[in-house]
Amino acid sequence: MKIKPIVAGNWKMHKSLSEGVSFVGKIRNRILDKEKVKVIFCPPFNSLFSIVEALDGSSFGVGAQNAHHEQQGAFTGEISVDMLKSMGVQYVIIGHSERRHIFGETDEWINQKIHAVLNGELIPIFCIGETLEDRQMNQTTEVLLHQIKLGLGGLDSIDPKKMIIAYEPVWAIGTGETATNDQVAEAHGNVKTILGEMFGDISKGVPILYGGSVNEKNGAELIKTDDVDGFLIGGASLKEDSFCSIIEQVTTYYRG
Ligand code: PGA
């Protein structure tokens, strides 16, 4: 099953509306092989609609960084999948480690969000990953198994075109510390095995992204790693040259 690699930029709480629109406009004008790599921007809510408009007619994707699982209601500060969809958003990051650790999202809640995103016919970018403590206690595989089992619980099947997994070791996010190729290969291999056990052969087509301090210096090596189908990038996705350089590295070195 051929997978098209993905490079997604998670802007977190960065860039004003005008900065965001100008940024995607510049990247749109760069010569990138968009046939070979799917590029997705995940700006904060404030600029989603304008960025969808700025990218109209291009093959770039736009994703949100979160969504509530209910369709509407008294949930101050939240946004629903339908609201995102009505703005032309196609992807939603779910279960990012900052949502889990700063905002207290649980696996059960993440599971409800995944169902809501799929029911709304958007594509989840489902984030999983162990903390440093988990890794030091040799719990990485168990933690990933637990997060995947609960996060994807209640799904009868999986459509590889409508699911993206992002493995992001918590200790590597925003720290400048990247997991080694062996650590990444092992984690991604385990994710594949878990998905295979849950959903069978069809899951082989689900893209598994790596995230955690990916930059223009380590992108080439990381994308050559077994079972790495692209990246979810924070810091380096905010800089035009770094982001484009990583896209080029994925275009050149992805082995799929
Ligand atoms: P980082 O963030 O690239 O800055 O480590 C990755 C992420 O949080 O998705």
Image (cartoon, rainbow, N blue to C red):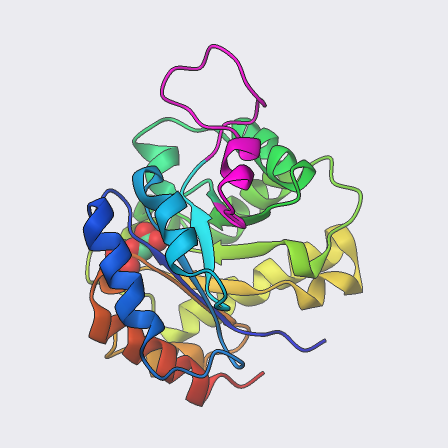
Task: Give the side of residue 11 with respect to residue 72, left or right.
Answer: left
Q: Quadrant of ligand 1?
A: bottom left
Q: Nearer the viewer, residue 66 or 210?
A: 66
Q: Main secondary structure of the magenta part?
A: loop
Res 102 quadrant in image: top left
Instruction: Indicate yes or no whether the magenta region holds residue 107.
Output: no
At which x and y percent is residue 180?
34, 71
- Please report the residue visible at 69 percent of the width from the left and 37 percent of the height from the top: 119
Q: Is residue 185 above or below residue 46?
A: below
Q: How many marks?
A: 0
Q: Is residue 20 left or right of residue 75?
A: left
The residue drawn where x is 46% and y is 60% is 56
Residue 76 covered by magenta stretch: yes
Magenta stretch, residue numbers = 67-92
> For residue 104, what is the image quadrant?
top left
Does residue 56 appear in this view?
yes
Q: Please, is residue 254 above or below residue 10 in the view? A: below
Q: Residue at x 48, y 33 (%)?
A: 67
Q: Quadrant of the C terminus?
A: bottom right
Question: Camera-side residue: 142 or 107?
Answer: 107
Residue that lies at the very extreme toward the bottom in this rendered image = 252
- Residue 178 in percent (x, y) is at 28, 66
